[in-house]
Amino acid sequence: MTDEMPLYERIYAVVRQIPPGKVATYGQIARMVGGCSAQMIGFALAALRPDTDVPWQRVINAQGRISPRPGFGGLLQRQLLEEEGVRFGPDDRVDFEVFGWGGA
């Protein structure tokens, strides 16, 4: 991954590295990509087409919760994560100690 790549492509390249059953935060992805904010990660993921190969569902907020966005509802995101083995606590949060991705 190089700085010559467009920003969104750099973001998608990092998100593609998150393995099934793991999650990362918007801020974590922003730090790994560099030169962007957590909000920009959200914009990039919201811009994805429904038939994407980018596992957008694996990116959640820093509180361990889903941040629903237009086009990709929270229920779908939760369902996709649960199908990968990610579990939500009674407060609808994901435990980063168990399901957090450490990065590449």
Image: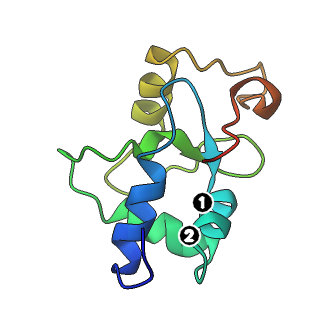
Residue 68 against residue 64 in the figure, above or below: below
User: What residue is shown at x 44% (from left), y 70% (from top)?
Assistant: 43
Residue 17 against residue 89 in the figure, above or below: below
Q: Who is closer to the viewer here, 49 or 68? A: 49
User: What residue is shown at x 48% (from left), y 56% (from top)?
Assistant: 14
> Answer yes or no: do the residues labelled 1 and 2 have beta carbons within 8 Å?
yes
Image coords of residue 88 (percent x, y): 68, 22
Residue of label 2? 33
Image coords of residue 34 (percent x, y): 61, 76
Query: Between marks 1 and 2, how big is the CA–CA gap?
Result: 6 Å
Residue of label 1? 29
User: In the structure shown, which secondary structural element does the residue marked by tag 1 occupy?
Assistant: helix
Residue 9 against residue 5 in the figure, above or below: above
Q: Is residue 59 among the parts visible in the rendering?
A: yes
User: In the structure shown, which secondary structural element does the residue marked by tag 2 occupy?
Assistant: helix
Indicate the quadrant containing the N terminus: top left, top right, bottom left or bottom right. Answer: bottom left
User: What residue is shown at x 21% (from left), y 55% (from top)?
Assistant: 49
Q: Is residue 69 among the parts visible in the rendering?
A: no
Q: Which mark is residue 6?
A: none
Left or right relative to 41: residue 90: right
Left or right relative to 3: residue 72: left
- Which quadrant would residue 76 be assigned to in this image? top left
User: What residue is shown at x 37% (from left), y 72% (from top)?
Assistant: 8
Q: Who is closer to the viewer here, 85 or 66? A: 85
Task: Identify the amino acid type marked 2.
Answer: Val
Count of labels shown? 2
Image coords of residue 25 (percent x, y): 65, 51
Q: Who is closer to the viewer here, 25 or 70? A: 25
Task: Identify the amino acid type marked 1.
Answer: Ile
How crowded is the residue under tag 1: few (<14 C-alpha within 10 Å), some, or many (20+)? many
